[in-house]
């Protein structure tokens, strides 16, 4: 439907937002709805609505192009007014536009967030008076349009009324052209013709062609009906289409499509069994009617088959020295991981065919697990694909959906390979420990085949339903904790633990990577801002408490943003951030060292704990009070830590003579053990020696050394048992300023995994028994009698020992 605008002249600015349209050419006086879904298009519509509602509509040359460039957009288009706008639930926008005037793009002024163009209006030449030739041409066009409608062309009756009353040749040409369903190329050529008489003549030619086509179609239908009955309707329709295409000189589009698919299958270099199945399904598609429900499913399936990289692979970069340089350039430290990658490249250089390793990086957030995968791919010259498994609960996400379901798709493994375009990418499975499981299956079990080097050479996706060789893929999994990962899945991977960083490592990483990156991302330069080493150390010590680097980068980014604001406000000077200026940018320190670390205290011991985000320092306090005997535990301790306190107390009671304690001390004293930060639950099998040391210190009144931290579990015989997470705990102790760390003797072997520069910062003492721990932790040990306080006197008889287990009758207790 076309409606002419009011006679009053509308002022059209020279600069307008551009809305690229596809599949349609908009003419002046034409009203039509448009669906807008691309970000730049939505931004252009929003800008137009915020101004004078005017927008320039130009058709793009390629319909399927999602991000058109100025070279792929026609220069001649139509200035239109947005009459209505409706936001759809799927994020798209529906607008109703009316063409006002033709225009030509003379210059592209901006490309982000939308195309802004300078235009010039293209007006039809003024015709003083219609000649006889013009009147005859206009009458011919109107008659031809009537003949086309009589042969079945659907055109609105309102349009015919407007056509009959129209006296301007240019407007008549635009009106007819916009309603007879022209191809985009023909419609655009018409729009670009400035002379109205020439344009009307071209419309007359197109109407003649359309009339002949419809006439031929009618003859074909008449002839086909005479020869064929209702049982041959499908054949009739195909013959009808073929006859029309032959009359137009066009090839059979479906036959061409089948030929292209067959050629793509041959070029995909599939394995013989896969190619045989693909050709079989292509034969089914060829015999199937295009409108059949299964036809679209088969076509999609074959598209996936030809796009999956069956034989395409990238060539590995086997220059070991160059790979080492790239790894060192991207990441500071992480020597164990780098060594493992270089070993893989060395073996690959000596043996061409080998199975890809399956590594699992385990460590707290922010230590570089995901970014390390990108560096590995860069060092090896491979494609990099990453999928996040966090929250995945459906097995079909891994293995794909069966083709019997509507909207079935391959699993994420096959999708990732298609995305990479090669069959040997570095494939990162992120957040492996956060996979869920419900009634839709167990995705972690589906990964067993993917991550098993003995099975993944014939991985079967439910959608593809054919074996695919994954042995060339280098899988890298990441997890914050290894415990939630099922045992069979752990068994298939080579687990590499990534602990946190020391203060010196964080300093170097911040200088090399974090500060330059944040300076660049916040729009300033290194000539504008300098962050001193002391400032970085202050941020690390007083504004972050983490194993990784995320909060450190956030704080550095905060400084850069504040400097960027000052630069934007006009301050032209060099900003230098030193340790004293950090508080000016970031406010008061967020973390301070605990007061217990300032001096030696009685009954206060520094313990070490492991958490999913790195090591933590844990202070254990014990105090003795007069009472009738009893043990109080506070601080939200778990069952394991409660048992550690009971074991430590039982050991101390068995050694009361060696510790110079009164034999009845437990009956005259109340013992209270507390772990600060009571709102945080605490549990784990590594606090036994810490609890025992705190109790001994409180009972003997001997202070505990402030610079000693410890970890280990205790037995009733006083033996110190090994623990896990040693490196994380040592890093936490270093961050807290601890000088001496006591660890179990059996953990001595784990010191080989700790870098030498960490071991140089602290003194590590190994202990087999709790006595060896006490000798290091207490100021004096064993306690002299003079240092031991006497138990308070108790009036009357001494109460008998508490019976923990009542003897049964007939049993000698």
Image (cartoon, helix red, strand yellow):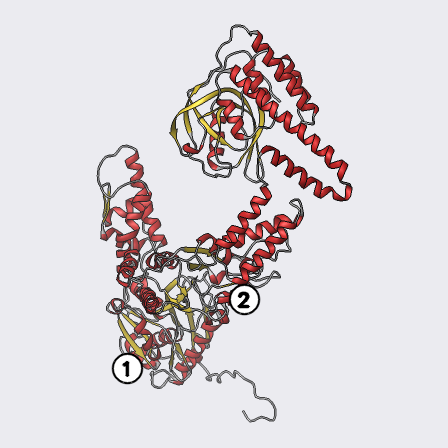
Instruction: Tell me how far mark 2 sits from mark 1, CA to CA.
Output: 61 Å
Q: What residue is at 52 percent from the left and 15 percent from the top?
A: 196
- Give the x, y percent position of residue 485: 49, 67
Residue 303, compared with residue 469, is above or below; it is above
The answer to whether one can see residue 794 in this image is no
Whichever of callouts 2 and 1 sits on the residue coming sooner in the sequence is 2
Q: Residue furthest top?
A: 129
**Mark 1 sits on what residue?**
784
Q: Position of residue 277 (x, y in %)?
A: 58, 59
Say which quadrant the C terminus sits in. bottom right
187 shown above or below 263: above
Q: Is residue 40 above or below residue 763?
A: above
Q: Quadrant of residue 23?
A: top right
Binning the other alpha carbons within 10 Å of mark 2 as few (below 14), some (14 to 19) or many (20 upward) gives: some
Residue at screen point 31% across, 80% down: 772
Query: Residue 675 or 240: which is nearer the viewer?
Result: 240
Query: In front here: 681 or 396?
Result: 396
- Decide if residue 363 is in sight here: yes
Q: SS at mark 1?
A: loop
Front one among 277 and 601:
277
Say whether residue 162 is left or right of residue 507.
Answer: right
- Front position among marks 2 and 1: 2
Badge 1: residue crowd in 10 Å (few <14, some 14–19, many ≥20):
few
Counting from the top left corner in percent of width and height, residue 560 is at 30, 44
Q: Quadrant of the N terminus?
A: top right
Is the Cβ of the residue at disc 2 closer than 8 Å to that at disc 1?
no
Q: Which residue is mark 2?
A: 445
Q: Secondary structure at mark 2?
A: helix
**Residue 6, picture quadrant:** top right
Front position in the image: 186 or 262: 262
What mark, if any, has residue 79 been given in the picture? none
Tell me where residue 641 appears, x and y as whole percent.
Answer: 45, 72
């Amino acid at each position: 439907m076309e409606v002419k605008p009011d006679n009053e002249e509308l002022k059209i600015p020279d600069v307008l937002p551009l809305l690229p349209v596809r599949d349609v050419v908009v003419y002046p006086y034409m009203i039509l709805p448009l669906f807008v879904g691309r970000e730049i298009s939505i931004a252009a519509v929003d800008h137009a609505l915020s101004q004078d509602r005017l927008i320039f509509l130009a058709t793009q040359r390629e319909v399927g192009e999602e991000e058109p460039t100025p070279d792929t957009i026609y220069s001649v288009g139509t200035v239109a007014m947005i009459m209505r706008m409706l936001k759809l639930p799927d994020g798209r926008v529906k607008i109703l536009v009316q063409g006002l005037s033709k225009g030509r793009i003379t210059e592209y002024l901006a490309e982000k967030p939308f195309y802004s163009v300078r235009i010039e209006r293209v007006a039809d030449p003024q015709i003083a008076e219609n000649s006889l030739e013009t009147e005859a041409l206009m009458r011919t066009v109107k008659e031809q349009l009537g003949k086309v409608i009589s042969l079945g062309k659907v055109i609105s009756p309102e349009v015919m009324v407007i056509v009959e009353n129209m006296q301007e040749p240019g407007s008549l040409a635009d009106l007819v052209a916009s309603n007879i369903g022209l191809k985009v190329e023909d419609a655009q050529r018409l729009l670009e013709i400035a002379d109205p008489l020439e344009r009307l003549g071209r419309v007359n030619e197109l109407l003649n062609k359309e009339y002949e086509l419809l006439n031929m179609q009618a003859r074909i239908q008449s002839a086909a009906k005479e020869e064929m009955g209702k049982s041959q309707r499908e054949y009739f329709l195909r013959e009808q289409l073929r006859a029309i295409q032959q009359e137009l000189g066009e090839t059979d589009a479906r036959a061409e499509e089948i030929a292209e698919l067959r050629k793509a299958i041959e070029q995909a270099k599939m394995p013989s069994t896969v190619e045989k199945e693909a050709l079989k399904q292509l034969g089914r598609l060829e015999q199937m009617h295009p409108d059949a429900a299964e036809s679209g499913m088969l076509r999609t399936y074959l598209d996936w088959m030809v796009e999956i990289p069956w034989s395409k692979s990238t060539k590995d970069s086997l220059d070991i020295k160059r790979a080492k340089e790239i790894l060192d350039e991207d990441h500071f430290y992480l020597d164990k991981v780098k060594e493992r990658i270089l070993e893989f490249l060395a073996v690959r250089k000596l043996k061409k065919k080998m199975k890809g390793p399956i590594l699992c990086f385990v460590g707290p957030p922010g230590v570089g697990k995901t970014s390390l995968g990108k560096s590995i791919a860069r060092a090896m010259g491979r494609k990099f694909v990453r999928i996040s498994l966090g929250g995945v609960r459906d097995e079909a996400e891994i293995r794909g959906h069966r083709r019997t379901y509507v909207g079935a798709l391959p699993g994420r493994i096959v999708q990732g390979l298609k995305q990479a375009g090669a069959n040997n990418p570095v494939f990162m499975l992120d957040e492996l420990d956060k996979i869920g499981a419900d009634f839709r299956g167990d995705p972690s079990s589906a990964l067993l085949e993917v991550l098993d080097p003995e099975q993944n050479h014939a991985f079967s996706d439910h959608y593809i339903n054919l074996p695919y060789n994954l042995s060339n893929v280098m899988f890298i999994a990441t997890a914050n904790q290894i415990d939630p990962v099922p045992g069979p899945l752990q068994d298939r991977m080579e687990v590499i633990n990534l602990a946190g960083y020391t203060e010196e490592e964080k300093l170097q990483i911040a200088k090399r990577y974090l500060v330059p990156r944040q300076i660049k991302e916040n729009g300033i330069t290194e000539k504008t801002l300098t962050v001193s080493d002391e400032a970085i150390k202050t941020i690390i010590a007083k504004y972050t408490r983490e194993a990784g680097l995320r909060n450190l980068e956030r704080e550095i980014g905060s400084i850069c943003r504040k400097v960027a604001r000052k630069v934007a406000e006009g301050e032209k000077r060099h900003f230098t951030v030193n340790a004293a200026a950090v508080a000016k940018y970031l406010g008061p320190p967020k973390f301070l060292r605990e007061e217990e670390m300032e001096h030696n205290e009685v009954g206060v011991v520094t313990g070490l704990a492991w958490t999913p985000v790195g090591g933590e320092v844990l202070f254990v306090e014990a105090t003795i009070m007069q009472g009738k005997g009893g043990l109080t535990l506070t601080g939200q301790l778990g069952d394991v830590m409660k048992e550690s306190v009971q074991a430590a107390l039982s050991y101390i009671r068995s050694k009361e003579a060696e510790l110079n304690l009164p034999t009845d001390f437990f009956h005259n004293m109340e013992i209270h053990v507390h772990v600060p930060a009571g709102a945080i639950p605490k549990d784990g099998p590594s606090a036994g020696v810490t609890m025992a040391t705190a109790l001994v210190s409180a009972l003997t009144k001997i202070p505990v050394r402030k610079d000693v931290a410890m970890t280990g579990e205790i037995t009733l015989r006083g033996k110190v048992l090994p623990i896990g997470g040693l490196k994380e705990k040592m890093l936490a102790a270093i961050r807290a300023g601890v000088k001496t760390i006591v660890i179990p003797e059996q953990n001595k072997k784990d010191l080989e995994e700790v870098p030498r520069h960490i071991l140089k910062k602290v003194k590590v003492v190994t202990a087999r028994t709790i006595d060896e721990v006490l000798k290091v932790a207490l100021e004096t040990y064993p306690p002299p009698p003079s240092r031991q306080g006497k138990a308070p006197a108790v009036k009357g008889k001494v109460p008998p020992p508490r019976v923990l287990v009542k003897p049964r009758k007939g049993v000698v207790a």
